[in-house]
Image (cartoon, rainbow, N blue to C red):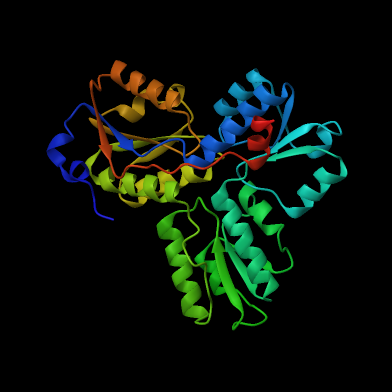
Amino acid sequence: MNESPQARDDTRLEPGSVVLLRPRGFCAGVIRAIEAVRLAIEILGRPVYVRKEIVHNRHVVDELTAQGAVFVDALDEAPPGAVVIFSAHGVSPEVRQHARRRNLQVIDATCPLVTKVHLEVTRYARDNYTILLIGHRNHDEVIGTLGEAPEAIRVISSLEEVDSLEVPDPSRLAYLTQTTLSIDDTAEIVARLKERFPAIVGPPSQDICYATQNRQMAVKSVASKVDGVLVVGAKNSSNSNRLVEVAQRTGADACLIDSAADIQPQWLEGRRRIGITAGASTPEALVEQVVSRLKDSGYTRVEEVEWIAEDVRFTLPPELKIKQTQ
């Protein structure tokens, strides 16, 4: 993918400016998950229970709570027969079975791109492959994916783990990835896997989602042209943390902030060009508040730099589409 003309034009990035990156913020999977909760409340009434955070952002969770959602860590916290929504990160088959045993009315808001990885796991496991899942062990998405075939999957997250890896049959080895990883870090791990295990196979298309890739590429396009990058996102948001790492790897001083309140005046000292982006589960309202805060601090010129236009849309969970027609 080539840089857009805007991203290449240094003259447009003037001192005293905020460089607002596009794309940023909500991806199609997040929009779908949030809309699923809102529609469920509207159609089915309160309360609607949501297992875990629907997306990794406290502000989104708080807003949906005010509308009538009840967030729970475990299905046992919802009464039998209740409406329960699975988050965008996906769940294991064990969780689905538990929901059926408790007669819960499930609305599955798993991102379709995460579902794609689950289907790849079941296909490789069925063919007796050892599956190397590249990702972060404690992330909700990885926990759900691991549950599809725990006996066949090994989670790896570093080159060191690749180097120490022993597998039962190197000729039947496959790799898959969490959807929200750093493109560069993942490419390094995959390259090392292919070096160690030449017969390893991977998915037909990359598992890292389009939104994660686009936001990282947008950061790369301007990181060397600004004095610092602020990433608006939650601390437990994988894709937000990866944006910080990508900016730092490109040579920019970058930090993750939850909201405008986290901006430290000393961090702004001596910086005239500040890049701003947001993780895929960050509401645009939070970005607007950050821009407003920077304007008050003297960054009076605000300019958007677009890497690529996004037009991806996902259909609602089928359970909700059925309810809408009833």
Q: Nearer the viewer, residue 249 or 170?
A: 170
> Which percent across, then down, holds residue 175?
56, 68
Q: Quadrant of residue 305?
A: top left
Image quadrant for the N terminus?
bottom left
> Which percent across, then down, holds residue 199?
52, 82
Q: Residue at x 33, y 38 (%)?
A: 22
Image quadrant for the C terminus?
top right
Q: Quadrant of residue 287?
A: top left
User: Does any portion of residue 25 appear in the rendered image?
Assistant: yes
Q: Is residue 115 above or below residue 201?
A: above
User: Does any portion of residue 139 appear in the rendered image?
Assistant: no
Q: Nearer the viewer, residue 47 or 271?
A: 47
Q: Residue at x 26, y 43 (%)?
A: 222
Q: Is residue 248 above or below residue 300?
A: below
> Which percent across, then down, holds residue 77?
82, 33
> Which percent across, then down, holds residue 225?
22, 42
Q: Quadrant of residue 226?
A: top left
Q: Residue at x 47, y 73 (%)?
A: 192
Q: Is residue 75 above or below residue 70?
A: below
Relative horizontal placement of residue 304, taking residue 235 as reference (left or right): left
Q: What is the residue that sits farthest to the top in this orientation?
A: 296
Q: Nearer the viewer, residue 293 or 218?
A: 218
